[in-house]
Image: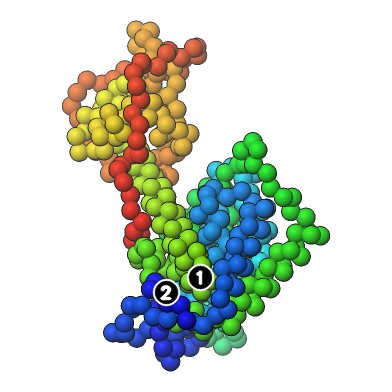
Amino acid sequence: MPVDERTNLQPPDRADGPGQAPRPGPGEPSGPADRAEQTSGEGAVLLDEFRAVIGKYVVLPSEEALTALALWAAASHIQTALQHAPRLAVMSPTKGCGKSRVLDVLHETVHQPMMTVNTSPAVIFRVIGKNPPALLVDEADTIFGPKAGDKEDLRGLLNAGHQRNRPAWRISGPEHKPTPYPTFAMAAIAGIGDLPDTIMDRAIVLRMQKRKMGEKVTPFRSRYSVPELNALRDRLGAWLGPLRGTAARMVPQMPVEDRAADTWEPLVIVADLAGGHWPDSARAACLAMTRQEAVQDEQTTLKTRLLRDVRRVFDQAGSPEALRSQDLLAALLSDAESPWPDYGTKGLSAYRLSALLRDFDIRPANHRFEQGRQAKAYARNKFLDAWARYCPNAAQPTPAAGPALAPARPLQGVPPAPPAGSLPVGPPGGTAGPKRAR
């Protein structure tokens, strides 16, 4: 029987609670152990075929993302044996990037799918039980977007359902008895823009993009696509169903830590059950995609820092209507404690400043200052919405002594040529690791 040093099998005679999968006891070894008996190569061949079929219908951002999607769908068939139910965040910057097609494929291949476009916590409370469905939520921006209203109950449910034994308590029945409702269920959530941070932190993230010229997919047609995918679903269930007990005892070695390890563990368990190249491919996908999200998180944090620093510069200048681009940039670079002097290779430039602010729909425009002088400038009112959304609690600094900058008004006309010189290159903020905080 083959040996896999990445996976440790533990005795099945303990459980953390009713309906919970067994876990290793304190002090038990976590070194090499024999992998469970299985049909040699069956799982690896099946996952290879499944991965290839998924790739026919959707163009994913990377090979690692395709691997992760196949493993996530397969993991739904052993959901009752898992300690964590990873979320799958299928995000895109605009419509038409293939998010809904990903959910179409998942609907025909996961165990017991529940597709919904808009739902309420009350509905989900009542459909999750001992054999939970795989929740497939489309149009998530209508649930969590700025115009969606208060959805804290739904967000709390999705957060809690990432881990076993996190019920939601409600008063129910004619006797008004406190009743626990289970929340544990895998969930794929698709939408434009990012989900709330607490959900993204529990998710495997697919950042979809529009297909490029030459990228072709097979049209998804129910009459032939659904039978093909359903046949794969049935084969996945037949393979993984008898291995649920084995999966519940597996403690795979993970290339990441903390919540990222919790989220990716079910996928790695499926890969280790399959064998072949899948254990290595799953761990490589885990490292690549968690690192990508760490960089994304760093970029988001960096942009929030930029918004706070820009507000400080405006406040110190006496809150003028606009600041010239070169004055704003000089003020940012003058703070030696900030990341801006070391941003890129030569420090923050006017071009990179504009690029960082573009995601907030903030761009410099031509303004006419006093005495008819014209210059590229940033209008203060363009920042108000971003300040309110991303740093609403930032402290208001005391204006520093110094000459007040002249107010400005918009100017129509041709913008001046950008300054000459090379632009800095290189990732902002240095390197980022795969570790996620709990």
Q: Nearer the viewer, residue 278 or 230?
A: 278
Q: Position of residue 3 (x, y in %)?
A: 42, 77
**Residue named by callout 2:** 4
Q: Nearer the viewer, residue 340 or 59?
A: 59
Q: Residue at x 37, y 63 (%)?
A: 255
Q: Residue at x 31, y 34 (%)?
A: 344
Q: Is residue 376 above or below residue 179?
A: above
**Residue named by callout 1:** 275
User: Could you tell me if the residues under marks 1 and 2 are in contact, i.e. CB atoms within 8 Å?
Assistant: yes
- Answer left or right for 70 relative to 314: right
Q: Is residue 319 above or below residue 338?
A: above
> Which element is circle 1 on?
loop
Q: Residue at x 38, y 67 (%)?
A: 254
Q: Amino acid at mark 1?
A: Gly
Residue 86 seen anywhere in this rendered image of the structure: no
Q: Is residue 23 above or below residue 404?
A: below
Q: Position of residue 367 (x, y in %)?
A: 42, 16
Q: Residue furthest top?
A: 371
Question: Dot 2, how many residues are within 10 Å of its Cα: few (below 14), some (14-19), or many (20+)?
Answer: some
